[in-house]
Amino acid sequence: MTQTSDRPERTRIERYDPVSIEPRWQARWDELGLYRTDLEATARPKYYLLTMYDYPSGDLHIGHWYVKTPTDAIGRFRRMQGYNVFMPVGFDAFGLPAENAAIKSGRHPREWTMQNIDKMRRQLRTMGAGWDWDAEVVTCDPSYYRWNQWLFLRFLEKGLAYRQRSAVDWCPNDGTLAREQVEGADRHCWRCGAKVEKRDLDQWYLRTTAYADELLDFSDIDWPEPIRVQQTNWIGRSEGAEIVFRTAQHDHHGGGEELRVFTTRPDTLFGATFMVLAPEHPLVPTLTHPSRREEVEAYIAQAQAATEIERLAADREKTGVAIGADAINPINGERIPIFIADYVLAGYGTGAIMAVPAHDERDYAFAERFGLPIRRVVAAPGEEDRGLEGAYIAHSADERLVNSGEFSGLPADEGGRRIVARLETEGAGSAAISYRIRDWLISRQRYWGTPFPIIYCETDGIVPVPEQDLPVLLPDTVDYRGSGVSPLTRDEAFLTVECPRCGGPARRDSDTMDTFIDSSWYWFRYLSPDDEIEAVDRSMVDRWTPVDQYTGGAEHAVMHLLYSRFWTKAMRDCGLVAEDEPFLRLFNQGQILGADGERMSKSRGNVVAPDDLVQRYGADTVRLFLMFMGPWDQGGPWSESGIGGVNRFLRRVWTIVLDPAGIESSDPESGHLPAGEDEAAAERSLRSAAHRTLRDVTADYEGYRFNTMVAKLMELSNVLWTYRGTPVANGPAWDEAVRLLLLMLAPSAPHVTEELWSRRLAAAGTPWSSIHAETWPTVDVAAATETTREVPIQIDGKLRDRITVPTTIGTAELEALALARPKVKAALAGQAPKRVVVAGGGRLVNVVVGAGPGASEPG
Ligand SMILES: [Zn+2]
Ligand SMILES: [Zn+2]
């Protein structure tokens, strides 16, 4: 506000000062328990609104605001629509960063974590979001992780958890990883980027593969297409056949061993002219001919020295050696030679392939190099005899089998099915489905996680910790430094235990669980965070889940978002919950990048601290600015250039509400209706604008189109601004438009609207009640669809005036409005007009006052 006004002293309106308003309302809402959800209440429909809970890094950044504040707007909007909204918040508090930070700073991970959580709770409060803090979960608390242990034991009972020794992915910093946590063609660690190696270890697995088909079914959930595609590809279902080849009799062994292969192309079986085994295949030592042994062993050693990625590289020269044994192709009895080659991996499929060089590029390259037969067995019409210059892969409907015995001439697909049927009758194969997904490896050699509730006894083997002994507490005083070995192995007091079965000496499992387990079921626990009897409260779970709306980053597509679906189904099969899916509707917000267009990071120095912005502009401005930036699913580089405009918008709303008469206006235009508009028309047009905005803003909230929602509210504020200081600003249309503006803005800018609402109530002598407890207003459809046009008014054929009227106006009403205009009245000077002509279907009014040339009717 200007301090240099030379106008006489009048009642000044207070300045908009978010820094004083916002904390006051936050405290008041807390005090009133406005967002504490009554989970038992059934009168209103439930709405479970969730954002991915946060890792307690200790600093809330703009990305947290970008996911949480629009979500809060959704929650407030749904509340006003009559839903019983539950919006809990919590912390994903176990995990490696705490351990690493602790190693660096010498502070215990628990201390580091809890201090960060305290700080983040304070930062979260500044958003003014309607969280139910009573439902908070913190996963490093034994009251949470004991149920990880309990659920793990249920899965173990159900056969959904098992222990197995195998070659696992190993990060030098993080220890074992799940397959989902190995990223990129160079196979780096998802967390630290280090190159991932292989190690042979005994580890715990969860049987995600048992749900592969069910996980491919998205029919009951509304999830973004990119996530569905990523999960589908990750699960990687392919249909084909498992075919059993048998080894041929040879001078060094009797033959008859089974070699199973999976193929998606059983139609090409007649083209299989050799087999390739992984060098690690268990039958290789048996099958290798003594004369080949030296070369074979040298090759195996060489293959093991190569990394998996080297072995799989498409452009790598194909190497291999014949082992001096043959297999029998079950469809035609042909003897075909067996090779080992490093492009076949033992851990994938059966570790053996049938090689069809005419129709597979790798096999073609291999056959060329070793001079092996290449036999075309699939061809398009007319191409049966054409030679091949490379593998023929195309697979279209009109292709037919050739060189395939009695199956020749059949369409390829049908031929494939008949070949499989034949194999089935002979016990040499069957239709089969293969998946890319593997079981979830959940053992981690780290300290800061949930201990496994497992004891190893020399007599009894694997013994689950009895339920009454849960939780197995994570000891506090472990030396957690160093990596490569579980820190808990250094804690004898923890490790040494009596076997619960035989009482003999036994040891605890020294690994901890993958922290993705914590996040696989936390939304169930929000419904009963303090329950000491049960993991989940079944009646609450039945009432409140699945989650109606879940929002978080798309980078979790094949980890958290897949694990959560698996875990829900596994809990269902243990009889703990009824539903199949965790989250009905998923939204992936975009990512806010640094101003330089790069990912925000401390090392780049491009991190935006929302705390500073809140201090400068207030939380409402920051919230609204983030929503106004662009479509919510897009994010983009940070730019503050628009934040001032958003702040000015809120100040304008402030002035519109508190100073409708324009007392403080210095605008010479204010106080006048727009040219051609009388008060009645102005009120109609204001009302129409308000309801049109309400109609559009309602749809925008529903569709999460927050940027256009804010733009429409800005337009409405502009319309109000033009009537400020005019007689319209005293009338009911103004009052209604202001009320609607505040109600529509309330979900997005909760503090300033609450403040203005309370002042309006006080001014009207009405007792206070929160704007956030109001009902979402109803659109007056007739008003919203009403549009106006400008009608010229002639007096004796000469243009004298213009009026703005609704397009729906009737002729009589238009005439009356025209005759009421001051200029027309003056021309009539108290006389009745000779004639009033409304022409062009209400597009022109001519008032005939006197005689003369101008009196002619317009054409
Ligand atoms: Zn790592
Ligand atoms: Zn025992």
Image (spheres, rainbow, N blue to C red):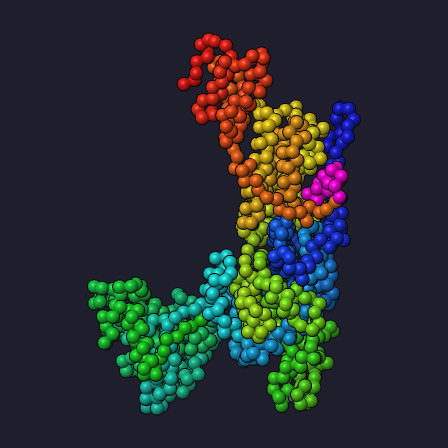
| Residue 223 versus residue 412 in the image, above or below | above
Q: Position of residue 129 (x, y in %)?
A: 67, 52
Residue at image point 56% right, 61% down: 583
Magenta residues, start to end: 750-767
Q: Main secondary structure of the magenta part?
A: helix
Which of the image's four quarters has the N terminus? top right
Hey, which residue is sitting farthest right in the picture?
9
Which of the image's four quarters has the C terminus? top left
Q: Nearer the viewer, residue 470 or 581?
A: 581
Q: Position of residue 545 (x, y in %)?
A: 59, 63
| Residue 790 versus residue 65 in the image, above or below | above
| The quarter of the displayed image where residue 339 is located | bottom left
Residue at image point 47% right, 25% down: 842
Horizontal side, residue 512 vs residue 373: left or right:
right
- Is residue 756 shown in magenta? yes
Residue 800 shows in the view: yes
Horizontal side, residue 832 vs residue 150: left or right:
left
Q: Nearer the viewer, residue 394 or 224?
A: 224
Q: Nearer the viewer, residue 391 or 81?
A: 81
Q: Position of residue 346 (x, y in %)?
A: 45, 77
Q: Position of residue 385 (x, y in %)?
A: 21, 67
- Is residue 713 shown in magenta? no
Residue at image point 48% right, 58% down: 226
Residue at image point 35% right, 88% down: 255
